Amino acid sequence: MADQNCLISNEWICGEYVRTRGQELTDATLQHVGITLASVAIGLVIAFPLALLARRRQSVAGPVLGLTTILYTVPSLAMFSLLLPVFGVSQAVVVTGLVLYSLTILVRNIMAGLASVPEDAREAARGMGYGPLRLLFGVELPLALPALMAGLRITTVSTVSLTTVGAIIGYGGLGNLIYEGMHSFFKAQVLTASVLCVALAVVADVVLLGVQRVLTPWARKRRKA
Amino acid sequence: MGVIGEAWTWLATGSHWSGADGVWNRLGQHLFLTFVCLAISCAVALPVAVLLGHIGKGGAIAVNISNAGRAVPTFAVLVLLLLSPLGSHGQWPTIIALVLFAVPPLLTNAYVGVSEADREVVEAARGMGMTGGQLIRRVELPLAFPLIMTGVRTAAVQVVATATLAALPGGGGLGRIITAGFRLTDTPQVVAGAVLVAALALLVEGAFVVLGLVLDPMRRKMGRRSAAFRRPPADQAPKAPALTS
């Protein structure tokens, strides 16, 4: 009975809320994860060739870095609003906005990672007969992984947090629950969704850190030695 | 193209600029909030960061606060503060949220700038008999200036962005034009508001870039003569990515 009361007395922490709205919470979390995954994946797919192009040509690097910095400065509410007439009210508005934000950090970090590859390693690979493609994927990319993964972690964590703003058009994952809870002054809903959102960011960060450690076994060995 | 034209018409309509819901009033609120909160954040964060950087301690905290700030959704904090007992105190929930999100970039950049000021120069200054206070004022602060300004610029853009979001729980500022547009399902107004907000954010960013160059104590003293002795440009310094919201 005490649990029932926490819904009526509108308390911040309410077990009954989590029990009765489990489905709603799961749906919102799944939408949140879906939007984040789509945004970061598309961002990575676009950022990688952009970084390669910018590395090869100085004339591309300037505009790419400048444009992504400008995009990063646009506040999220304005970004989603500006994309609204392009896509209408749909998930594409939120995903596109988040992709544009992700490019800033991803392009920079991929470029920094590639620039940090020692020239010796490149020379050695070329001497062993590596072609440009094998050089890129066999030598440069693995060596650039720490910087790339650092960028990916920053991007993922901020994407999780920015997804909430998508609530303005109804595609904000857990942000939708926060938005609803704001209008109905439903404290338990706002707090639960907020905590889940932060937890999601932390879990994503830890998972990516694990992926990085698996992908760069040599760094682990060096640390141990 | 239709919406863009209509958004332009919205902006060109004089009546949308005047009155309590007009652009001028909302812009005034936005700038006031930005200025007040940036001033409070600098007053809180910069002395702490400079002092920590000077003694070279607390680096982990300075960096972790920045990372934590990224993981916490601005929107969630705004709504949580609104529903808290503070919510009935007018602007205070907004001001507190704005300050909370402006502090991390200020803290991290100023800390890194001061703690990583050229050690040889710092040692030389110490050898010349400078006291701790003199060291901070005459050596570390001038050397750290570009990074401190990067932090201030990032924080300013962050405050502008957060102040926009504050319109969702009913705070003042340009964001209200967007949220009102959504309520009226008036897409041209939503776009017009978004253009105004984006323009303001870019102007603030640009203004602080210029301010940083003009005020830079090293640049003023050295002028163009000794370009070779200048520090590496701020771009090459480890740039803590801005936290947009």
Image (cartoon, rainbow, N blue to C red):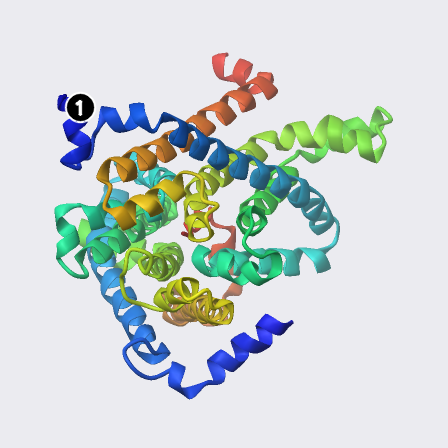
Number of numbered tags placed on the structure image: 1
| Residue B51: % across, % down | 22, 47
Residue in the foreground of this view, choosing between B207 and A127: B207
Residue in the foreground of this view, choosing between A170 and B136: A170
| Residue A213: % across, % down | 54, 20
Q: Is residue A47 left or right of residue B76?
A: right
- Can residue B135 be seen in the rendering of this structure? no
Amino acid on which disc 1 is placed: Asp
Image vertical order of residue A107 relative to residue B201, above or below: above
Residue in the foreground of this view, choosing between A130 and B143: A130
- Residue under label 1, please give it: A3
Quarter of the image where the N terminus of chain A is located = top left
| Residue B212: % across, % down | 40, 66
Asked where in the image residue A110 lies, by quadrant, the reply is top right
Image vertical order of residue A102 relative to residue B214, above or below: above
Residue displayed at 46% across by 64% down: B185
Mark 1 chain:
A
Image vertical order of residue A174 relative to residue B102, above or below: above
| Residue B202: % across, % down | 47, 67
Q: Is residue A188 left or right of residue A25?
A: left
* Secondary-structure class at tag 1: helix
- Can residue A40 be seen in the rendering of this structure? yes
Answer few, some or many: residues within 10 Å of disc 1's Cα (few below 14, many 20 plus, some between 14 and 19): few
Residue displayed at 55% across by 22% down: A211
Residue displayed at 51% across by 26% down: A208
Asked where in the image residue B23 lies, by quadrant, the reply is bottom left
Image vertical order of residue B213 relative to residue A159, above or below: below
